[in-house]
């Protein structure tokens, strides 16, 4: 009797021989056990494959949900950024207008001050000119 084990043939001629009918029954039982083991192995692999596919489907679903969640967060962040940018631009326009108006008012104020100073200077110059002319006239009359 020879059987296959790890790819090698082994000789079991030292075992007592079974009668012909019992050998056929033993061989049939052995073949049935081998078939049952092959069936059990196939079922084990099928169950393992189902569990692996189930776990992969589960992980894929969670990953998809995370991606959807991240997309929603990014959309919200983009919306907030656009809104914030719009508000900042509006505020900046108001500040620029205020600075422009303030600059215009300051320039007008400085011009008014300068005009008053120029008028006062011209008035003082005229008064000094008049005093000099009057003093010179008085001097001429006195001499």
Image (spheres, rainbow, N blue to C red):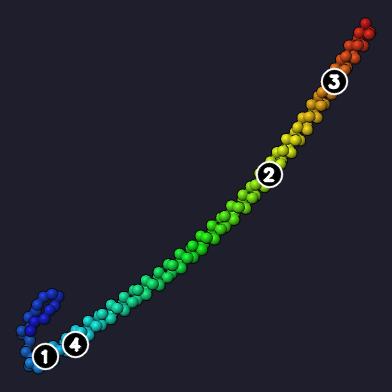
Which of marks 1 and 2 precedes in the sequence? 1
State the image coordinates of residue 118 (x, y, percent, origin top left). 79, 26
46 relative position to 124: left or right: left
In the depicted structure, whether residue 48 falls above or below residue 106: below
Residue at the far left: name it: 13
Q: Which residue is mark 2?
A: 97
In the depicted structure, whether residue 63 falls above or below residue 114: below
Q: Nearer the viewer, residue 13 or 30?
A: 30
State the image coordinates of residue 79 (x, y, percent, origin top left). 56, 58
Q: Secondary structure at mark 2?
A: helix
Q: Residues within 10 Å of mark 3 (few under 14, many from 20)?
A: few
Q: Which residue is mark 4?
A: 32
Q: Quadrant of residue 50?
A: bottom left
State the image coordinates of residue 16 (x, y, percent, origin top left). 6, 89
Mark 2–mark 1 Cα distance, whole angstroms, equals 107 Å
138 relative position to 105: left or right: right
* Callout 1–callout 3 Cβ contact below 8 Å: no
Question: For the point 19% across and 87% down, which residue is it?
Answer: 32
Q: Which residue is mark 3?
A: 126
In the depicted structure, whether residue 83 falls above or below residue 100: below
Which of marks 3 and 2 precedes in the sequence? 2
Which of marks 4 and 2 precedes in the sequence? 4
24 relative position to 120: left or right: left
Q: Which residue is mark 1?
A: 24
Question: For the point 20% across and 84% down, which residue is it?
Answer: 35
Q: Secondary structure at mark 4?
A: helix
Mark 2–mark 3 Cα distance, whole angstroms, equals 43 Å
Residue at the far top: name it: 143
Mark 1–mark 4 Cα distance, whole angstroms, equals 12 Å
Quadrant of the image for the C terminus? top right
Question: For the point 7% across and 86% down, which residue is it?
Answer: 15
């Amino acid at each position: 009797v020879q059987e296959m084990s790890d790819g090698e043939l082994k000789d079991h001629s030292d075992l007592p021989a079974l009668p012909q009918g019992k050998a056929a029954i033993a061989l049939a039982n052995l073949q049935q056990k081998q078939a049952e083991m092959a069936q059990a192995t196939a079922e084990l692999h099928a169950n393992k494959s189902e569990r692996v596919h189930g776990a992969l489907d589960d992980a894929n679903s969670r990953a998809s949900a995370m991606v959807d969640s991240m997309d929603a967060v990014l959309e919200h962040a983009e919306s907030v950024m656009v809104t914030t940018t719009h508000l900042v631009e509006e505020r900046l326009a108001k500040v620029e207008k205020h600075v422009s108006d303030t600059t215009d008012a300051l320039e007008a104020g400085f011009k008014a001050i300068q005009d008053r100073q120029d008028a006062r200077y011209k008035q003082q110059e005229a008064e000094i000119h008049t005093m000099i002319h009057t003093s010179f006239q008085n001097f001429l009359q006195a001499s």
